[in-house]
Amino acid sequence: MPLVVQKYGGSSLADAESIKRVARRIVDTRKAGNQVCVVVSAMGDTTDELLDLADAVTPSAPERELDMLLTAGERMSMALVSMAIANLGDSARSFTGSQAGVITDDVHGKARIIDVTPGRISGALGDGHIVIVAGFQGVSQNTKEITTLGRGGSDTTAVALAAALNADVCEIYTDVDGIFTADPRIVSSAHKVDRISNEEMQEMAASGAKVLMLRCVEYARRFNLPIHVRSSFSHREGTWVYPAAEGEEDVDAEAPIIAGVAHDRSEAKITVVGVKDTPGSAAAIFNLISAQQVNIDMIVQNVSAVATGKTDVSFTLPKSDGQRAVTALQEAKDELGFESLQYDDQIGKLSLIGSGMRSHPGVSATFFQALADAGINIEMITTSEIRVSVITKGDLLDDAVRAVHTAFGLDSSEGEAVVYGGTGR
Ligand code: ADP
Ligand code: ASP
Ligand code: MG
């Protein structure tokens, strides 16, 4: 019997009615002659609400307890979906991540899956049950503590289980019809793509397209697993994220030059003003930042002023790490010898992604011209082989995304993209 792994996101499980609707879909899949293993996220915006609640209790919740709290969200969903299936006359068994054999390292809040031992899942499937697994969580091999995988982590649970169970299909159900050329909440003229290479999807996810968690896409690539992203609110065919054949690059001769435009509002920018332009200055700054366990994204160093021999160094980092980095830099001001610090958390990052960039010149020129025509100033630029990213002012980001989307001819002629649910939080 074919084995299907399905994952339902929070927006598909927002309330009792949605849970019943999802249960019906699961039962239909089972009735069609499949074994079904389902991964669920927390209902609606539960994870955010739990985080707000923790914040209201204490500004510095212990990481262990935060994971205990957040994993409760997915446990609610798994039990409710299981009950709704029972109510339809089918038999389901729910399992926490730990019971499902999701073994992680011991980093709370962003644990990595190091092994999956799905013995209980296989057993329950073999006994004829539908299996419901709480996503986003696992258990640490060393500490035996409950861990979470990071925001959007249920996507990774689904792919990891699909790989471990050798599933025939891994379906990610969400509140849009698949992967679009831009976030349909911002670009209503975005169009759904039928396929996207895993490589391009990794760049999209890394650039802020949260429709799939980055780690889930990386995991799927490692295990050579295709993913079908689709809507739980419609029966339309979604988007296939396809892996490259063994030893090959993700090259698809038929693919368009540009896969899509992604945006990200989660970063802030720090400028270290008046740094000595001598060997070791940048190393000293970034050693300090790295000691704070902060990941840097973009870095720009200006040409030094001839008169002073000093320069400015700007970099972006997650907003959530911003204050920590600023405090560490301030404390080391004398040692590092800079003049002042600027902190800006009202920025946006816009990225254009497409593997066709490798072989088509002129992509950057069109990109920058589109921003210029829209009157949008660029604060920083980075590129990879298949991506160009810029930082703009945060309040101009939506306009920038739309301008670039149009400039590359990505606008759909078939009406507006549908967003079925979710709050976009
Ligand atoms: P779920 O609750 O199902 O996990 P998410 O909110 O995590 O859903 O992801 C789905 C959302 O991702 C969509 O509602 C959409 O706003 C956003 N999104 C961002 N970029 C894209 C894109 N390129 N294609 C489709 N959706 C995107
Ligand atoms: N509930 C978790 C989150 O909101 C995990 C997930 O939805 O994938 O990040
Ligand atoms: Mg998600």
Image: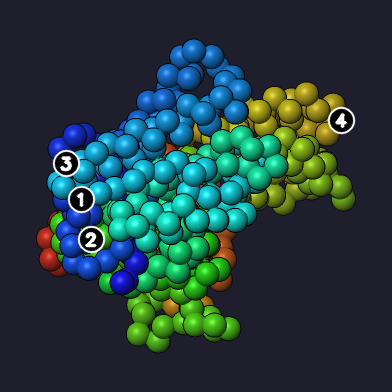
Q: Which of marks 1 and 2 is nearer the N terminus?
A: 2
Q: In this view, does 314 lie to the left or right of 178?
A: right
Would you say 166 lies left or right of 328 here? left
Residue depicted at 22% across the width and 68% down the height:
33
- Of the image marks 3 and 4, the number of the one nearer the N terminus: 3
> Where is residue 169 drawn, in percent x and y?
35, 68
Residue drawn at (26%, 60%) of the image: 230
Residue type for callout 3: Asn
Type of amino acid at the residue the image marks with label 4 = Glu
Query: Looking at the image, is 300 positioned above or below residue 230?
Result: above
Q: Name the residue under label 2.
A: 30
Label 1–label 2 contact, CB within 8 A = yes
Q: Is residue 58 visible?
A: yes
- Expressed as whole percent of the image width and height from the top left, the position of residue 345 reads 51, 33
Q: Position of residue 285 (x, y in %)?
A: 77, 40
Q: Residue 335 carries which label?
A: 4
Identify the residue position indicated by label 3 in the image: 87
Give the residue displayed 21% in from the left and 34% down from the top. Answer: 15
- The one of 201 and 134 positioned closer to us in this rendering: 134
Gap in angstroms between the C-alphas marked 1 and 4:
67 Å
The earlier-in-sequence mark between 3 and 2 is 2
Badge 3 element: helix
Residues at circles 3 and 2 in contact by the CB criterion of under 8 Å: no
Q: Residue furthest bottom?
A: 253
Q: Is residue 18 left or right of residue 195?
A: left
